[in-house]
Image (tube, grey):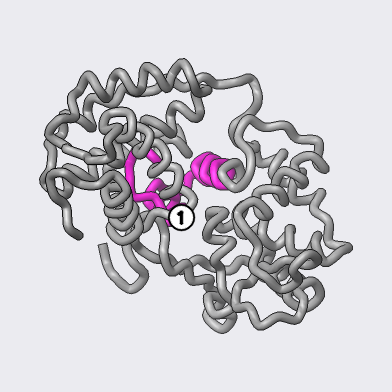
């Protein structure tokens, strides 16, 4: 990667995107969001399109967050702050700045609503019990939801899951690339395996696509998108009569982590299952003592830790 003083803005964002993809394994949707807000910051500071990192000041950072706070809701503002921190970490990795710019990004306070942010075990079973198995779409959506609720797959991991990633003989699903940059081997539980078999045998149309989950009507056989997976979760919540502040796959992953912690599962196992590399991330999913989180590790299957 060629990083230099007087960078063109488009080139700076392209290099940032490549860093997120190759060094951190960030999915395409998240990279687009990070580039959107990092780009807005750079465009405001360098309207001529030429980025000079040494001219970026702490005041620029704080000022941008202040303007964003008046423009965006708290959830989006948190994404703005995360995007800037990630961009400044990239600059630091390239030797273009120290820690001061990253540290200048203010923390965004969480504003919690009265709606639940995870499903308690009873509500989760209520959701799963309400899933439809009488139609092709129902079989597909049930299998996708169980992959998230029981195995902790991200929406993007459900979308990218290939037929070749399922090892029926060994009883595992291979997740080849996670946000951590590592892969994972996840056990196929009886419930998840049965749902996948039902879908593959009775719900999946004939197609040459290697993706497990595909469209059924408009473009039958084409891979599903992130929005299709998210809509499946939202429809299931509505059918079950459950309201929640967090929706989509994140709600299911959060519920899984919280349920595992309540049953006494160790933090190492929870972090490994969900594919977390940062202590702060696992802390969000399970409210635990930060000192205990220091033991979290993410070994690649076959490697000791």
**Residue depicted at 61% across the width and 46% down the height:** 252
State whether residue 98 is above or below residue 13. above
Q: Is residue 162 visible?
A: yes
Assess whether residue 266 is covered by the magenta stretch: yes
Q: Secondary structure at mark 1?
A: helix
Q: Which residue is mark 1?
A: 28
State whether residue 216 is above or below residue 201. above
Assess whether residue 54 is covered by the magenta stretch: no
Quick one: label 1, few (<14), some, or many (20+) residues within 10 Å?
few
Please tell me which residue lies in front, 271 or 43.
Answer: 43
Look at the image and give the residue range highlighted in magenta: 253-281
Question: Which image quadrant for residue 299?
Answer: bottom left
Q: Is residue 152 visible?
A: no
Q: Position of residue 244 (x, y in %)?
A: 67, 32
Classify residue 82 as left or right of residue 198: left
Q: Position of residue 289 (x, y in %)?
A: 35, 32
**Residue depicted at 33% across the width and 44% down the height:** 278
Magenta portion: prevailing SS class: helix
For the C terminus, give its image quadrant. Answer: bottom left
Question: Which image quadrant for residue 98?
Answer: top left
**Residue depicted at 53% across the width and 40% down the height:** 258
Classify residue 69 as left or right of residue 50: right
For the N terminus, give its image quadrant. Answer: bottom left
Classify residue 271 as left or right of residue 238: left
Q: Position of residue 171 (x, y in %)?
A: 56, 76
Q: Position of residue 130 (x, y in %)?
A: 82, 49
In the rendered image, the residue lying farthest to the front is: 48
**Residue depicted at 80% across the width and 53% down the height:** 131
């Amino acid at each position: 990667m060629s990083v230099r003083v007087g960078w063109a803005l488009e080139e700076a964002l392209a290099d940032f995107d490549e860093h997120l993809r190759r060094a951190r394994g960030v999915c395409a949707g998240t990279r687009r969001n990070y580039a959107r807000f990092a780009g807005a910051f750079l465009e405001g500071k360098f309207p001529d399109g030429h980025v000079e990192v040494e001219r970026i000041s702490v005041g620029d950072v704080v000022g941008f967050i202040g303007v964003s706070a008046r423009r965006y809701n708290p959830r989006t503002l948190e994404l703005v702050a995360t995007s800037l921190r990630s961009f400044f970490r990239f600059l630091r990795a390239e030797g273009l700045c120290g820690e001061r710019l990253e540290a200048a990004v203010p923390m965004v306070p969480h504003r919690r609503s009265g709606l639940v942010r995870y499903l308690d075990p009873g509500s989760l079973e209520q959701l799963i019990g309400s899933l439809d198995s009488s139609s092709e779409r129902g079989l597909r959506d049930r299998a996708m939801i169980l992959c998230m609720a029981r195995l902790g797959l991200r929406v993007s991991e459900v979308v990218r899951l290939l037929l070749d990633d399922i090892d029926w003989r060994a009883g595992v699903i291979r997740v080849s690339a996670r946000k951590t940059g590592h892969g994972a081997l996840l056990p196929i539980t009886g419930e998840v395996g049965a749902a996948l078999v039902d879908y593959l045998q009775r719900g999946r149309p004939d197609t040459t696509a290697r993706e497990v989950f595909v469209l059924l009507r408009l473009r039958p056989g084409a891979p599903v998108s992130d929005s299709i997976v998210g809509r499946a979760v939202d429809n299931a919540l509505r059918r079950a009569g459950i309201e929640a502040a967090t929706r989509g796959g994140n709600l299911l992953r959060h519920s899984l982590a919280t349920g595992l912690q309540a049953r006494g599962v160790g933090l190492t196992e929870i972090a490994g299952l969900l594919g977390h590399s940062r202590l702060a991330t696992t802390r969000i999913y399970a409210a635990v003592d930060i000192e205990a989180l220091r033991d979290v590790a993410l070994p690649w299957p076959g490697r000791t830790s």
